[in-house]
Amino acid sequence: MNKSTLLCTIKSLRLFSSSVNAQSKNPGKYCLDLVRHNDYENYLCTLLLPKNLIPAAIAIRAFNVEIALVQDQSQQETIKEMRYHFWNDTLAKIYSDNPPEAPVPLELHRILKTQNLSKRYFQRLLDARWKKWKSGMFLNLSDVEKYSEETVSPLYYLILEAKNLKDVHVDHVASHLGKAQGIVTLIRSIPYHAQKRVLVLPQDILMENSVSTESVFRGEASKNLSDVIFEVSSRAKQHLDKAKSLRGKINKDVSTIFLPASNVERYLDKLQKVDFNIYSPELAKKENMLPAKLLIDKLFKKW
């Protein structure tokens, strides 16, 4: 690293540190705002949880947002790497009763005083994104499934721990829903990542359907690309259906925890209606009635 790059890196990290320190006076509100601005659909679902579960769920999702944003906060690989190391060290400090003076670590530390949340699930969230950043691409659909489970299912496991619930059937629902939601999240992110020349589709399926990486980056809709999206989204649907099939084996009291499944199902239905054209304007339209729809889903215990 040359001197200029080093100085730029140090300056960026100082600005980052100053920003989080300025927000640390009200960690709970910071976490709430962070999730609302960056993970709106899950934010709405979280607000519909039992009141005593909301603070922990918001803190858990805020941690996930922070580490997910690492790659978007800077184009410099050195800064990305330092931030991942920052969060790795931060996680260790939180569980060593010595959290940094930053809002998300402080809020998580506060939650841990009353609720037993396993460090391994937070570590899994962080490690999965770190590995993806280092590898750069998914070779096949199995890689997509694994990444999806490792970046979504631990969130459900942690929220279930906050509820002090341990049940093998519930864990199975969390595993399958995590895969379904993770895959759908990747599909939804394709137009955004294409602008940054980041590929989130599996290489083997692209090659089988003669879809070039460049055409994805250029945002070119095609029948072949739709076939790729169909195949990937079908795997998400399989996991969603499996999660739905297990609902009868779990207590209805935990159904609200899995309410994000409604958003997954709703998006897959919309994707089918546009013939799996990921660049269709219909998919980008804001759903103004979403809060009401989720409330209805909760009241009728759809999940």
Image (cartoon, grey):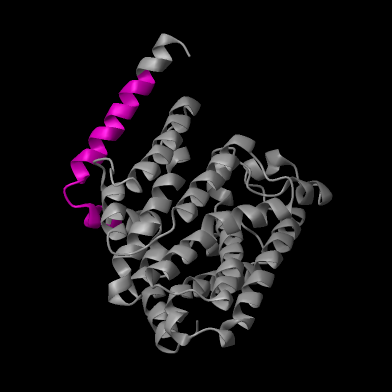
Q: Position of residue 243 (x, y in %)?
A: 61, 76
Is residue 288 in sight in this rendering?
Answer: no
Q: How many numbered badges does the structure rendering display?
A: 0
- Residue at coordinates 26% horizontally, 49% vertically from top-left? 106
Is residue 82 in sight in this rendering?
Answer: yes
- Residue at coordinates 56% horizontally, 49% vertically from top-left? 191
Closer to the camera, 206 or 20?
20
Closer to the camera, 280 or 144?
144
Q: Position of residue 249 (x, y in %)?
A: 58, 85
Closer to the camera, 110 or 23?
110
Q: Position of residue 260 (x, y in %)?
A: 48, 71
Q: Is residue 40 above or below residue 132?
A: below
Quadrant in the picture for residue 173: bottom right
Tell me which secondary structure the magenta stretch mostly adopts.
Answer: helix
Q: Is residue 203 above or below residue 249?
A: above
Most extreme residue toward the front is: 96
Q: Is residue 87 above or below residue 169?
A: above
What residue range appears in magenta?
Answer: 8-32
